[in-house]
Amino acid sequence: MQLPLSFYEISELIFLTVALTVLTRLIIYLLKRAWNKQKCKLVWTPIDVVDRRKNLSYHEFIKEYASIGKPVIITDVIQDWKAITKWTLEFFKSECGSIKCAVKEDKDEVEGLMTIADYIDYIKSGNSDRHLYLANWFISDHPQLLEDYEEPIYFPNWLQRLPRKLLKKYELDNPELFIGHKDTSIGLHKDPNNGSAWLGMIKGRKQIVLFTPDQEEFLYSGKVNVFNPNLEKFPLYSKTNSIEIILEAGEILYIPPNWWHHVRNLENTIAVGSLLLNELNSELFFKSITEKDSLKGHLLPLVLEFPWLGKTLFAIGLI
């Protein structure tokens, strides 16, 4: 007759089981990282126009666009969002009017803080002396807004595995609301850390000019005003081959990693967008972080794979 296990033996068995599980996960993680490092590289596809697609499956999106670094406009995803009818200037003034947010002017320099109500009044006044837009307004700060939209199926985002406070600390929180006065411009730029991105139009229209990553040497680190280029000051810009689109309300634009873009509001606009980290650009993203901070760059993949580790390290102040 077999004697029952002692408390010590049970504890030892539990410890060995947990250790074996963690070790197995770690081995799988290391193998996945080795595989991803081999296949993950910056890829882009030169184009003459940006496709407009509807009834696009996730598989088609990955095969025809994301995996080959090709932007696309998806026209039939966000029409059913509550935000399409609910998010108006009047709504934000009424529901969020006392909140203070940063306002920026053209080249992303922060000009100061304004309440949402004051900014809405500025837009409605038609004041064209200054071109201010509302920036760094994160939906996560306002849980009531989370019910008004849905993350599109095309854009899984590993950043959402991290604690919200950690994302805020390192300015990786997403998605972000953009409210812009007519003729305001978000300066020529590429999204940070080799991230891809999506931008969904709720109200108004945006003019967007895109450039493939290989044209970076002609863009003068984003100092060029694409909508009125000074070719005497920036002569190499004449060598660029840009693609221009008009993004309409109800449409989403996918922007692959390292595609430069300059955005101008043709009307007063409301939009929502998000920086993306997933298997298609993960190693490029990690490399970018590592170049800035080696420790954080090596920790980020671990805390994404093991979210409990991120919460623990953040709680004790190591990250």
Image (cartoon, rainbow, N blue to C red):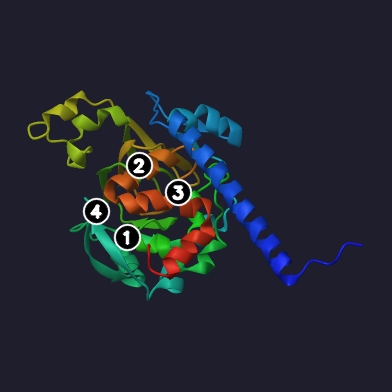
Residue under the point 37% across and 76% down: 98
SS type, badge 4: loop
Q: Total of numbered circles in the picture? A: 4
| Residue 253 in picture, x, y percent from top left | 44, 40
Quadrant of the drawing holding the N terminus: bottom right
**How busy is the neighbourhood of tag 3: few (under 14 within 10 Å), some, or many (20 plus)?**
some
Q: Which residue is mark 3?
A: 301
Quadrant of the drawing holding the C terminus: bottom left
Q: Which residue is mark 1?
A: 134
Q: Are circles 1 and 3 on residues that touch, CB within 8 Å?
A: no
| Residue 115 in picture, x, y percent from top left | 32, 72
Kindly report which numbered mark, 1 or 3, lies closer to the viewer in this rendering.
Answer: 3
* Label located before the other in sequence (4 or 3): 4
Residue 1: in sight, yes or no?
Answer: yes
Distance (Cα) linking label 4 and label 1: 10 Å
* Label located before the other in sequence (4 or 1): 4
Above or below — where is 114 with respect to 196? below
Q: Which residue is mark 4?
A: 108
